[in-house]
Amino acid sequence: MKKMYKELFFFEDLEKEVQEKVIENYKEDCREEYEISFLYEDIKYFIDEKIKEMGYEVIDLEVCYALDYCQGDGVSFSGVFKKDGKEYTLERNSSYCHEYTMRSLFYEDEESNIFFDEKGLEKMRTIAREAKKYGYDSIEGYTSEESIRDIIISNEDTFTSNGKMMVPDFYM
């Protein structure tokens, strides 16, 4: 039986050009993974806190976002919020995710549906715009070169000389 060995390198031991390649590959992988597993909860928490700062109790909150650096990107949300014993419902009226897809209703009792005034709705839209910026900032921060370097180094990832990540046998 022949044994074959492959020379492996830690990130900081790779050539500079190879490090740049590793970072670009990692950035794409991180962006996809981050949007799926982290961003929704981060944006939801951000919106929840902003609504609470306005004095509302958050009963239910659902978030929609599209942050792909394309026309039509944005954040919107729907939910039920309570303030001064009154229940407010915020609804989305489109499959798009920007702030102008939100409309708000005020339920004083079961027989009257009074629309939020424009000022109240605009405050909610402002939160959605702030959440959009927060989302973009989160993506950029998580996929920054510095952040990726820190992750790779702290994970002690190993690579071939051309930058291909090698997973140790004990992970398989």
Image: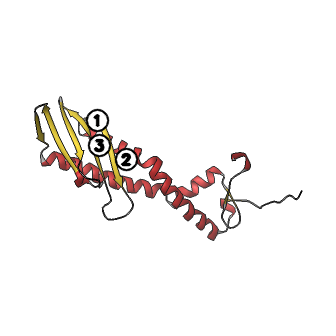
Position of 161 with respect to 144 (left or right) is right
Amino acid type assigned to the residue bearing label 2 in the image: Ile
- Judging depth in this view, the residue of 26 and 93 nearest the camera is 93
Residue lying farthest right? 1
Q: Residue at x 48, y 56 (%)?
A: 32
Q: Earlier in the sequence, mark 3 or mark 2?
A: 2
Q: Residue at x 24, y 53 (%)?
A: 101
Report if the CB atoms under discs 1 and 2 are less than 8 Å apart. Answer: no
> Which of the labelled discs sits on residue 83, or is there none?
none
- Judging depth in this view, the residue of 115 and 155 nearest the camera is 115
Residue lying farthest bottom? 17
Amino acid type assigned to the residue bearing label 1 in the image: Val
Q: Position of residue 140 (x, y in %)?
A: 44, 58
- Disc 2 packing (10 Å; few <14; some 14–19; many ≥20): many
Position of 115 with respect to 126 (left or right) is left
- Residue for badge 1: 58
